[in-house]
C-alpha cells in the first residue's frame, strides 16, 4: 500500500487530474457536483426553477417525471469544473443581477464543498415566470 492518495472527479468519460492526499482516494462523480449546484441555484433569490435543457427533459417535466439534474451540465477537465445552467427566473427581478448572484453562489459552494476550482459558470435564462400571487404563471 502506498502512503499517497488522490482525489478524482469522475464523469461520463475520463477522470480529472488527481490531487494528492495522505492515504486512500476519493472519487467525486459529476452528478454529485450537479446536486451541489442544484441546491445552490434554487437557494438564490429570483430563481424559480431549473429549466429543461433538451426535448427529453421537457417531455419528462410535462409528464411529471423530473430528473434531479434537469437544467444542469457539469464538465470536469484538467482538474477544473465548468457548469452550464438553464434557469427560470421570477418576472420583475433584475435578470443580470440574479444571474451574477447565481454564478457567484455556485462557484463558492462547489469550490468549498469539492475543493477544486470552478473555471466557469454559464447561466442561461430559459424563461420568466410570474409568481402565483399575481394570479397567473408562464412556463
Image: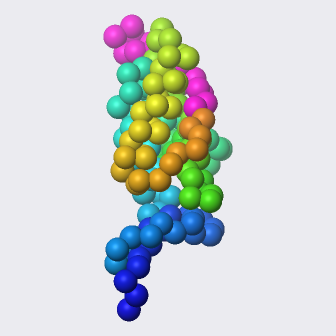
Q: Which quadrant holds the N terminus?
A: bottom left
Q: Residue at x 65, y 44 (%)?
A: 55
Q: Which residues are magenta?
A: 123-139
The x, y position of residue 29, in whole percent, is 47, 63
Which quadrant would residue 44 be assigned to in this image?
Answer: top left
Q: Nearer the viewer, residue 129 or 10?
A: 10
Q: Indicate yes or no whether the magenta region holds residue 126.
A: yes
Q: Residue at x 47, y 53 (%)?
A: 116
Say above or below: 16 vs 139: below
Specify whether 92 is left or right of 12. Answer: left
- Tell me residue 56's x, y (percent): 62, 48
Q: Is residue 32 above or below residue 60?
A: below
Would residue 51 appear left or right of 115 to someone viewing this image? Answer: right
Nearer to the camera, 53 or 9: 9
Asked whether residue 129 is in view, the answer is no
* Residue, far bottom: 1
- Which residue ends up furthest to the right in the rendered image? 55
User: Which x, y percent locates residue 130?
Assistant: 46, 14
Amino acid at each position: 500500500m502506498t502512503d499517497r492518495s488522490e482525489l478524482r472527479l469522475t464523469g461520463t468519460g475520463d477522470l480529472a487530474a488527481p490531487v494528492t492526499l495522505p492515504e486512500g482516494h476519493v472519487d467525486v462523480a459529476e452528478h454529485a457536483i450537479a446536486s451541489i449546484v442544484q441546491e445552490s441555484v434554487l437557494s438564490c433569490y429570483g430563481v424559480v426553477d431549473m429549466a429543461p435543457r433538451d426535448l427529453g427533459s421537457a417531455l419528462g417535466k410535462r409528464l411529471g417525471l423530473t430528473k434531479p439534474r434537469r437544467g444542469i451540465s457539469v464538465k470536469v477537465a484538467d482538474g477544473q469544473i465548468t457548469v452550464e445552467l438553464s434557469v427560470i427566473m421570477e418576472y420583475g427581478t433584475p435578470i443580470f443581477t440574479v444571474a451574477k448572484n447565481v454564478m457567484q453562489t455556485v462557484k463558492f459552494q462547489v469550490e468549498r464543498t469539492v475543493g477544486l476550482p470552478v473555471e466557469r459558470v454559464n447561466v442561461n435564462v430559459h424563461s420568466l415566470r410570474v409568481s402565483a400571487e399575481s394570479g397567473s404563471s408562464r412556463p
